């Protein structure tokens, strides 16, 4: 566990991190990307960290890859690349910088390292895990293969490197249906998200999809009644759900898709009022790009994603600690599963 007191004392000897109105005003261009969700006093507290990180990135030759669930100060303030799991996996293969700072959860940092074995991948907080990824291990994959001999295993990227290595191919929420449809045979094993698998099964009826009993703690909490209540309170409300939600929740929504697809849909449809049935930071991160849209609750916060903070990113870059390593014997087959996903996604999009 990170010793926050020691970290703060060390950082204070190298950087001026006191809240600064003057610096915040100088960096007003960055604040403009998030001023709808981050009041100026909060920005005055964040600006010194953003300035220090961006300066240190240039000195170190580093890039920051940030998931859509990061807080606005990270998403808009320091990220070089933002996106969903598929976008970040693809961009990780294009990164020229020698250092990658992964603002997300641990499996994402592992994926970046798998795809860039010669690069340094920093994880600002090694305890930023994922309940879904932790719901399965390679033994679980072996159990599913024994139960359904010959069926290909499609594992969500929200899994450990070891699980990826035990799988045939990976998928994300944005390409899961296309990946599954392209698999040989009548039966396909999907792990570890049972709700994603059941939602994909509705899209790919020609396949018999069997699944592992895992779920995301953020998305499984939503209920159809939540959505019906909000529709009653706000007539005309458009509801957008993530496919990690249970199928009965997805059925109540006007649109369902990955975080990248959600962003695209809001940008195209531009509803007067929208509710994103996903992690809380999603609406915050796209609010300023769509001032004509009123974003309404509810949302659920991911406690793992929120472990990543500006302070921890600065410390990781300053100290070069939190380096992610993947054993070569695991990395090779895991890389194959991820690369198959990337290659197949590109083929299907062509």
Image (cartoon, rainbow, N blue to C red):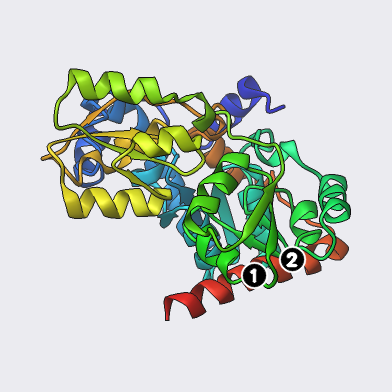
**Between tags 2 and 1, which lies in front?**
1
Q: Nearer the viewer, residue 289 or 62?
A: 289
Q: Position of residue 297 (x, y in %)?
A: 30, 24
Residue 256 visible in this rendered orientation of the protein: yes
Q: Position of residue 271 (x, y in %)?
A: 15, 42
* Residue at the image position 42 percent from the left and 81 percent from the top: 350
Q: Residues at badges 2 and 1 in contact (C-beta under 8 Å)?
A: yes
Q: Is residue 242 above or below residue 146?
A: above
Q: Nearer the viewer, residue 114 or 345?
A: 345
Residue 122 visible in this rendered orientation of the protein: no
* Residue at the image position 15 percent from the left and 38 percent from the top: 293
Residue 63 placement, left or right of 250: right
Dot 1 alpha-carbon crowd within 10 angstroms: few under 14, some 14 to 19, many 20 or more: some
Which of disc 1 and disc 2 is earlier in sequence?
2
State the SS at label 2.
loop
Q: Nearer the viewer, residue 191 or 81?
A: 191
Residue 324 placement, left or right of 217: right
* Residue at the image position 33 percent from the left and 35 percent from the top: 276
Q: How many marks?
A: 2
Q: Position of residue 289 (x, y in %)?
A: 20, 47
Badge number at residue 68? none
State the SS at label 1.
loop
Q: Quadrant of residue 217?
A: top right
Q: Position of residue 164 (x, y in %)?
A: 74, 57
* Residue at the image position 53 percent from the left and 29 percent from the top: 220
The residue pinned by badge 1 equals 183
Marks 2/1: CA–CA distance: 10 Å
Q: Quadrant of residue 342?
A: bottom right
Residue 249 placement, left or right of 105: left
Q: Is residue 258 above or below residue 346?
A: above
The residue pinned by badge 2 equals 168
């Amino acid at each position: 566990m990170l010793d926050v007191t020691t970290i703060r004392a060390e950082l204070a000897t190298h950087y001026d991190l006191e809240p600064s109105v003057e610096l915040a005003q100088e960096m007003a261009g960055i604040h403009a990307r998030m001023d709808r969700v981050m009041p100026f006093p909060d920005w005055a507290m964040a600006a010194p960290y953003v300035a220090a990180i961006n300066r240190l990135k240039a000195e170190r030759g580093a890039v920051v890859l940030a998931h859509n669930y990061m807080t606005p100060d990270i998403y808009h303030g320091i990220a070089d690349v933002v996106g969903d799991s598929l976008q970040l996996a693809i961009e990780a293969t294009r990164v020229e910088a020698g250092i990658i700072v992964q603002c997300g959860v641990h499996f994402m940092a592992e994926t970046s390292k798998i795809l860039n074995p010669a690069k340094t991948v920093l994880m600002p907080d090694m305890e930023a895990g994922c309940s879904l990824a932790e719901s399965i291990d390679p033994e679980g994959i072996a159990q599913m293969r024994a139960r359904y001999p010959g069926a290909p295993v499609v594992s969500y990227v929200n899994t450990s490197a070891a699980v990826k290595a035990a799988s045939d191919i990976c998928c994300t929420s944005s390409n899961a249906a296309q990946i599954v449809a392209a698999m040989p045979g009548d039966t396909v094993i999907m792990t570890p998200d049972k709700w994603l698998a059941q939602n994909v099964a509705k899209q790919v009826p020609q396949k018999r999809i069997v699944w592992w009993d895992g779920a995301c703690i953020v998305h499984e909490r939503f209920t159809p009644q939540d959505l019906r209540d909000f529709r009653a309170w706000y007539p005309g409300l458009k509801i957008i759900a993530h496919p990690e939600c249970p199928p009965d929740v997805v059925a109540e929504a006007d649109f369902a898709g990955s975080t990248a697809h959600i962003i695209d849909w809001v940008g195209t449809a531009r509803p007067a009022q929208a509710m994103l049935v996903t992690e809380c930071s999603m609406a915050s991160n796209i609010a300023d790009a769509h001032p004509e849209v009123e974003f309404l609750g509810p949302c659920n916060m991911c406690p793992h994603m929120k472990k990543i903070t500006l302070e921890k990113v600065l410390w990781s870059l300053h100290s070069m600690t939190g380096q992610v390593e993947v054993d070569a014997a695991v990395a090779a087959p895991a890389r194959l599963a991820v690369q198959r996903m990337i290659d197949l996604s590109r083929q299907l999009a062509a």
